[in-house]
Amino acid sequence: MKKRINKSERKFLSAGRLQQSGQKPKDLNVHARSQWRWTNMFLLSLCIFSASIPFLLHIFSASIDLSRPSDIGLNHTINMYLTPEQGVRVGVWHTVPEHRWKEAQGKDLDWYEKALGDGSPIFIYLHGNGGNRSALHRIGIANVLSAVGYHVLVMDYRGFGDSTGEPTEAGLCTDVLYLYHWVKARSGNSLVCVWGHSLGSGVASTTAVKLLEQGKEFNGIILEGAFLNARMETNKLTEHPFTWFYRKFPYIQYLLFNPLKNKDLNLPTDENLQKIRTPLMILHAEDDHLVPFTSAQEIYRIAKKAQNSDERVKLVRFDGSLGYLHNGLYKDPGLPNIIREFVQSLMI
Ligand SMILES: *[C@@H]1O[C@H](CO)[C@@H](O)[C@H](O)[C@H]1NC(C)=O
Ligand SMILES: *[C@@H]1O[C@H](CO)[C@@H](O)[C@H](O)[C@H]1NC(C)=O
């Protein structure tokens, strides 16, 4: 978009130059004069048109209203706000299974809440750093999960999107625990799984441990583009062999942890996985440019050892040639089946 505006500005400038240099000759016959007038009018219209392009672009690229997911074609998704703590309001999108999309038309929060108990598996999706729940790759995963037949709840943690409050590690986990209990109060006997992407993978594993302390657990955990430990990633664990990647590319910390980067971050997935006995699937693209694939291999090694099982811990690698990088797994045509098989394995 920026490029297009720049282009139009260039056009505008060059049109202005043309006009200035188009000086009126002294002796002109009528034909030449009218031609000169037409040229001028043409250039003037061009100027007006070019100058209005940025405004037109502005009108058509109006920012997404998070309270109205239907504006961007999400026709079986509703927006809601929860209050995990006094003074903190978080925005959540609830998407019902795609096969219910027709039924969902025009329905209110009450209907969606009841739908949560329809027996379909439920995913709580914890997104990564940057942007909000409307980002393309997040909608991409929600759509895949919905198409497979599951409910998806995508939350903006406090301090993200239209959610109020200050983002902190403890605050993020409080928001997720609150959403988990909110879901469990409505989900009957349905499976409730968590999907954590990037920053969200650390929040997912940390929340899973907090749930264990309450004697509860997710039925399944999927970690996508997961890092081992935020302390390492923010360079506080400098002796760790994996930190070389982040010392080499310091900007990555900004991309992974931006609103939280100056806070004391732990999100120790490596340590959490020692305690967790929940079935786990790790998804990682070989060409992930923010969290190296070796991170997934290490997570896999740790979890497999802790759970002492090849069945309960899976690592799915996406070939580097597919170009998915850190956010693109939702594009994989095989993903629906990978997810379906994982969820079915939880039902046995
Ligand atoms: C959420 O992100 C979209 C782009 O995906 C943007 O248009 C919108 O303004 C953002 N809203 C908030 C409240 O951050
Ligand atoms: C609503 O969404 C579903 C699933 O994405 C799609 O198949 C259907 O065509 C959409 N309907 C309308 C009216 O947009």
Image (cartoon, rainbow, N blue to C red):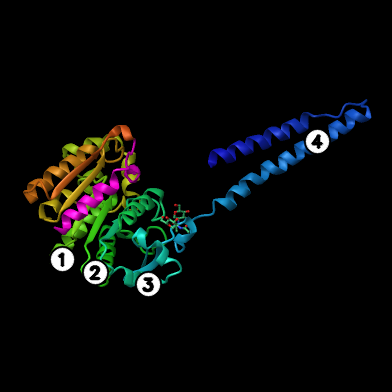
Q: Quadrant of the C terminus?
A: bottom left
* SS of the residue under disc 3: helix
Task: Tell me which label, 2 or 1, sits earlier in the chain.
Answer: 2
Decide which of 168, 217 is in the foreground and name it. 217
First in residue order: circle 4 vs circle 2: 4
| Residue 164 pos. (x, y %) | 39, 64
The disc, 3 or 1, on the residue closer to the chain's N-terminal end is 3
Q: Does residue 155 appear in the picture of this structure?
A: no
| Position of 297 relative to 169 (above/below) | above
The number of numbered discs placed on residues in the rendered structure image is 4
* Real-space CA distance between mark 2 and mark 1, rounded to the nearest whole angstrom: 11 Å
Mark 2 or 1: in front is 2
Q: Are marks 2 and 3 in contact (CB under 8 Å)?
A: no
Mark 3, residue position: 111
In this rendering, would 344 be left or right of 7? left
Q: Amino acid at mark 4?
A: Asn
* Residue segment shown in magenta: 323-348
CA distance separating discs 1 and 4: 76 Å
Residue 40 numbered tag = 4
Residue that mark 2 sits on: 184
- Alpha carbon of mark 3 to alpha carbon of mark 4: how far? 62 Å
- Labels 2, 3: front one: 3
Asked whether the residues under the numbered discs 2 and 1 touch, taking CB atoms below 8 Å apart as contact, a structural biologist would say yes
Q: Position of residue 38 (x, y in %)?
A: 82, 35
198 or 13, nearer to the observer:
198
Q: Quadrant of ligand 1?
A: bottom left
Distance from the alpha carbon under mark 3 to that under mark 1: 27 Å
Residue 331 belongs to the span the image colors magenta: yes
Q: Are marks 3 and 4 in contact (CB under 8 Å)?
A: no
For disc 1, the marked residue is 216
For label 4, the SS is helix
